[in-house]
Image (cartoon, coloured by chain):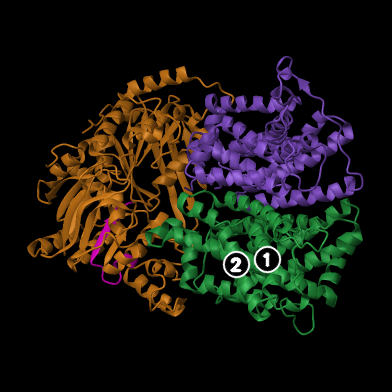
Amino acid sequence: MASRSLDPVASTAAPIVVLRDITKRFPGVVANDAVSLAVYPAEVHALLGENGAGKSTLISILSGMQRPDSGTVEIRGREIRIASPRTALDLGIGTVYQHPTLVPTLTVLENLMLGSSWRAPMNRAATRARLSEIAGLLGIALPEDAPLGSLSLGQQQLVEIVKALWRGESVLILDEATSMLTPQGVEDLGRVIGRLRDAGIAVLFITHKLHEAVRFGDRVSVLRQGRKVGELPPETLAELAPQEAIDHIVDLMFGAAADGTVSERSRAQREAAPGERVVIEVDRLCPTGSPAAAGDAGVSFAVREREIFGIAGVDGNGQKQLAEAIAGQRHADAGRIVLDGAQIEGLSVRQRQHAGLRYVTDDRLGEGTVSAFPVGLNLLLKRIGDEPFWRHGIIRNAEVERHARSLIETHDVRVPGPDTPLGHLSGGNVQKALLARELDAQPMAVIYNKPTYGLDLNNIRRARRAICENADAGVATILISTDLDEILELSDRIGVMLDGRMVGVVENDGDAARRVGELMIGVGAQA
Amino acid sequence: MTHAPTAHEERLAPGATALRHWAMPIAAALLPIVLALGVGALILLVLGADPGAFYYHIVRRGLLSWIGLQDTITRCAPLLLLGASLIVAFRAGLWNLGVDGQFLLAAVISAALAPALVTVLPVWLVLPLVMVVAMAVGAVWSLLPALLKAYYGVNEIVTTLMMSFLGISAANVLIKLPFDDPTTTVPQTETLATDDRLPRLFGSTINVGVIVSLAVILFIHWLMTRTSFGLRLRLVGANPRAAVHVGLPLGALMVAVFALSAGLAGLAGSVEILGVWGNVRADWNPAYGLMIIPLVFLARFNGIAVIGFVFFFAVLSIGGETASRKAGLPNYFILVLVALMLIFLALTEWLGQRRQMAARD
Amino acid sequence: MSQGLLSDAFLISLIAGAVAAGVPLLLAGLGEQVSEKAGVLNIGIEGMMLFGAYAGFATAFGTNSLWLGFLAGAAAGLVMAMLMALFCVRLGLNQIVIGIALTLGADGITALLHHVQFSRTYPRLPRVETLDIPGLSEIPIIGPSLFARHPMVYIAVFLVLVLAYLFRNTHVGLNLQAAGDKPDALDAAGISVTATRTWSVLFTGVMAGMGGAYMAMIGAGIFVPFMTGGAGFIAIVLAMLARGRPIWVLIGAFLFGASLSLTTALQVGGVNVPTDVVQMLPFLMVMIVLVLFARRASLPAALGLPYVRGQR
């Protein structure tokens, strides 16, 4: 754990950035409602809030991507209008965005040179020198001439940080910086942040994870529904024990006490009466394009009815390829898949669906839904042409609408009507619609890929409850997630993927977290 | 990748929307036409022609005289079929920019086949048979771009254009070498006797091809909006990755889209020959294809709206021939008008989006 | 000296023709390469070439100066490109619809202007003054066809080197690539995507306009309606296949140029083939190349997509 700075200078020094009464509206939402915030040099200011609380808007205002409707920004005591990303960079505000903003086809060095005026000479030597200077400050090493796309996500993020610091930044904004990192990567990031703070840089650390805010932040501000609902200055934070701090912040975030008991109860019930029958068995499956080495034995596991089999692992270790190969939308070079006693690896996506297999994709907007189509059609996307919604291939709008209304109601999708284009829905409602579609019509086995990624806490709870209820009702569940907490909360057994292989399967008992964590980073692999 | 032509949000029941949903799109579609005619008038002035007289002659010849009106309606036939062809492709998110080549090749094959077949088969059998062959010719000509797009992801804009140029030259080679009628001095195919062409309606010069074309475009509109097959194609157009996710055979559907679209373009060529010309002369190329694209966009891929725009364009092109002649200008002025319409269409679309966004704020 | 396909006359004619037909493709292809790199698929390039061809010819005819002709061609291409940049880059309208519109518009306008000005006389420009490179131009066969040309030929080839250098060793190259591959990265780095793409489209217009001007003034010596005949589309394919390497545009342009000039060369060589067959050659070559290298014809990730800040 990074030591918390108790240096009195941190709080007595003048703030470098002051946001005053920032308000920003989007169609139908107030993203920021009179938010005020101060960021001090040599201090890590954690900005905590659920998705949709307005964190991203605040950052994009600070980094010049958007302009506030009202309110002022002061930098070093002067009121300033940040008109563009360029202005922000000139002011010494460097941002590491949640989504990578480097060019994968350029090398590390070229990415770092990007952003100078086109007339400027391209000075590789000076760039290398500056890179090693910053790398020294951060205590890291980077392959300068490798194309960025060939680096690991953790390394890419370090490049993002180097780039953000390039012009001797005095403010560094980190937006959900840990979302793609391994536990080891989070440790490394913590060390880097500590070094930055010690170098006098003001760090604004944006996260939706409570323990990260407490762990990294010298000062914690909480955003909720666009409003700042509280701030814990370093003095207060230092006085509180970590658990007290967390409880205090939870109160700020949610007002009411949070309940995480549904899944506990569900898991206890399932443990008491485990399913017997194996519903889906994957045998030495080698998905095409998986990161596994050639000639690898492939992935094998079996899931019984009423069982949730969690698949943990850092993103990009072959989970997506595995899910797609089981669902049938990706080829497998070898291996068998048995569903309810019948081999299905030769079947098409549709045939597997009819056999009772469902795949809830993690890419909800990219492949799971069609934004331009109405909600009603999206809810039937996997049943196009089926009775009773189509008869002899001709659509029956009344049936489509009836079906849509019933799913919208049972799954509480907030939408004006079945005719509304899906693109108008919020992320949480898109996921509700997706789950409604996949869990409709008695599935036998369901693969969930990152089912709560990017959702806010209420919708996360709702999605997890839906997963549990369906498992309780008999569905054999494969739960892929990069969120270890989620895996531990829901799963009965946990398989861990690393480099395209399943490196171990552990029962979800008291010691699971440690063993899964070890497996994830390649320590203690089972035979 | 280039973004798919389908840009509009789809509604569950396209026909069942209220009147105010109609009024705005109609106004939005007419505005670019009015603006284009306005700017066109300025260009006419610069060229030393009288815009008032020019537009007057267009309407008089293309719409108000019975002979001209018959020509206008006859001209609609190939244009409607090309419109149907492009609706299929664009709704499925594919740019079939090769309709001119498909049209011309099918026309030449039709012109070569029909006079030969009438000597051995009854006419009522020859005409539909030739049309089917023409559709197959069009479809075959789209196969290579279709396969390249479906299985290698090669940009179909470029390949269909290339195949179009190839098709036009290939058609000329066919006319000049194997299908050349030795009895004529200019290279051209044998001529189908007037009695053997598509039957005419009620003693007019309008042939039954117009009826066929209307039926086809209405059918295509229905197919795309009301059937599961059409929905699958629209899904491919709106989000190909979703199509894969829900288990549609993406490659096969793309090939089917190209085949249907190019087949209809081929049918257009066939109808034009069997109904109007009876033969193809060397270097004949009406190049309807690129002109129809803007109309299909103006109509927002709606088959019924395409009928209206095609009629308008037919008036423009039939009347324009006379008007240009009287003004001492070549007929190319229509090209300029179409280009202007496209640009103003794009602009009104953009303004509409901005208004929508502003309204949501 | 032997007759037929291997005669000196045939080779000289073929190489000379390849250069004459290849230079417009080279200029336009280099221009298109820049805008494709930046993420704009410039379908309007055909219209830009045609407008450039008309303007170049009309100016050269009026002033007797090829250089003024090139200037006018570049200006005509630039005007078209400004429209393209305004509609597609600034307003984010559909690049293909606008591209088709510009091409149709140029088709119509130039045909009208040609009709008004030249349709009675069909004037030709006089033979072009060449710049003979001492020594090299005296090499048999390739000497006169490669090293005794209008200076624009050498400028076009020199531009290949300039662009190769720009792409590799300057911020211009980095910015272009970022604008095409990951525009939000460029935006986040503080460089305007809109400005980068606008400049690239304007550059394309200038290059395409000069290519068209060369085609009319030097290649043909005359302007006829629709004379570009798909050359702009071939330039698009060249840029696609060259994958960001200007040298491949050069090689491709002269290969296509050679196939375009084959008719004349064959006639000089004493072989008679219908022009229609030969006209198919360049397009046939494109298709063959695309079939053979289908997987290689890669395009930037954000090609054809308008950039809207904050929207991924």
Q: Is A417 in front, or is C31?
A: C31
Q: How would you rate the neighbour count of disc 1 (Cα within 10 Å): few for under 14, some for 14-19, many for 20 or more?
A: many
Residue B135: image tag: 2
Name the residue: 50% across, 54% down: B147
Residue that numbered label 1 is attached to: B269
Which chain is assigned green? B
Magenta-colored span = A437-453
Q: Position of residue A36 (x, y in %)?
A: 41, 43
**From the viewer's perspective, is A270 left or right of A229?**
left
Between the C-alphas of marks 2 and 1, the distance is 9 Å
Disc 2 is attached to a residue of which chain? B
Q: Position of residue B199 (x, y in %)?
A: 72, 80
Q: Is residue A508 above or below residue B195?
A: above
Q: Is residue A428 among what the camera can see?
A: yes
Q: Position of residue C212 (x, y in %)?
A: 74, 38
Q: Is B55 in front, or is A484?
A: B55
Q: How would you rate the neighbour count of disc 2 (Cα within 10 Å): few for under 14, some for 14-19, many for 20 or more?
A: many
